[in-house]
Image (cartoon, helix red, strand yellow):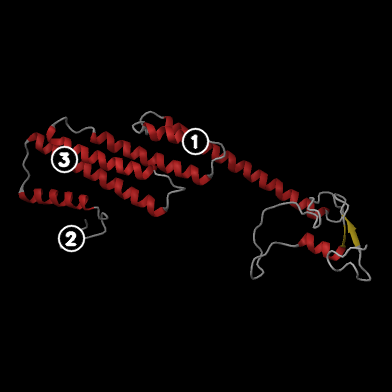
Amino acid sequence: MTEIFFGTEHKPHARFVELTDCGHVFEVEMMDQWMDQAETMHGGKPVDVEVTLKRCPKCNIPIRSSLRYGNVVKKILKDFEEIKHKLSIDKRRLDQKVDRLKLKVEDIGEIDQFPNDQDKIKRVLDNENLKDEQINLIDNQIRFLAFLQTLKANIGSFKADKRFQETKKGLENKVEQLRYRVMRSRIQFSYQEREELKEEMFRTKLLIDLRMLKMQLDIRGIQLGDTDAVVVDYIGEVLDSEKKIGKNTDKRGTNV
């Protein structure tokens, strides 16, 4: 040995090992440390690293057939198999979830009132190797669109009467604004974003119910008493205020 690589080759009792994969020879003590070393972060704590074959420190060829380091190689190969098995299970789980979402998207009456969004979601679901966060995003979008479709159907129940067309148009605009928020580009829904959308959709549903009630009263020529009229108007103001429902109270301490 004439080359100094690790710096311990000159020791009187130094021993050496040859890597059969590439033929390079190294001092045993330092090569053992090379094979046993673990990735660490500041503070000396071990961290999870990508499982890869150990490589020759000189030429970077993978070490596969060393007799001395056979146990190290076997452990790494075992880790490979475990990872492959886990990935296979995860892939099947994701594929099953994608198949369920495809059925929901293709189901008549689920989100077919939003054909452009429906086609967009179908195209995304046809992509290979979708990640979990992408699938969860689509799942949430389908759920929200399905709820908006029920709201859209309720708005369609308004009579074709000029007196109610402005109200109908205003509610349709609210649904469209919510649809836009649901389908805008993002990596995933944050918890806060999901909760805000749920609240806005619930508010819009209550607003549609209130407008429907007023329409029916108007059609039937029913006049509310002073107290009932005040309550109905107050509820309308609360729903139009965009304040969180149930989070504020009026002067009497009543939840609004």
CB-based contact (under 8 Å), mark 3 and mark 1:
no
Closest to the observer, 119 or 233: 119
Q: Residue at x 44, y 36 (%)?
A: 121
Residue on which the image places disc 2: 250
- Where residue 226 appears, as percent x and y from the top left, is 5, 50
Q: Report the side of 201 relative to 165 (left or right).
A: right
Q: Nearer the viewer, mark 1 or mark 2?
A: 1
Residue on which the image places disc 1: 125
- Where residue 118 appears, as percent x and y from the top left, is 40, 33
Q: Is residue 207 above or below residue 48?
A: above
Q: What secondary structure is marked by label 3? A: helix
Q: Report the side of 126 relative to 171 (left or right).
A: right
Q: Is residue 173 visible?
A: yes
Q: Residue at x 83, y 53 (%)?
A: 70
The disc at residue 113 is none
Residue 217, picture quadrant: top left
Q: What secondary structure is marked by label 1? A: helix
Q: Give the residue type at disc 2.
A: Asp
Q: Residue at x 46, y 33 (%)?
A: 122
Residue on which the image places disc 3: 213
- Report how far apart the C-alphas of labels 3 and 1 lie in the structure: 40 Å
- Where residue 86 appears, as percent x and y from the top left, is 63, 45
Q: Earlier in the sequence, mark 3 or mark 1?
A: 1
Q: Nearer the viewer, mark 3 or mark 1?
A: 1
Q: Give the residue type at disc 3.
A: Leu
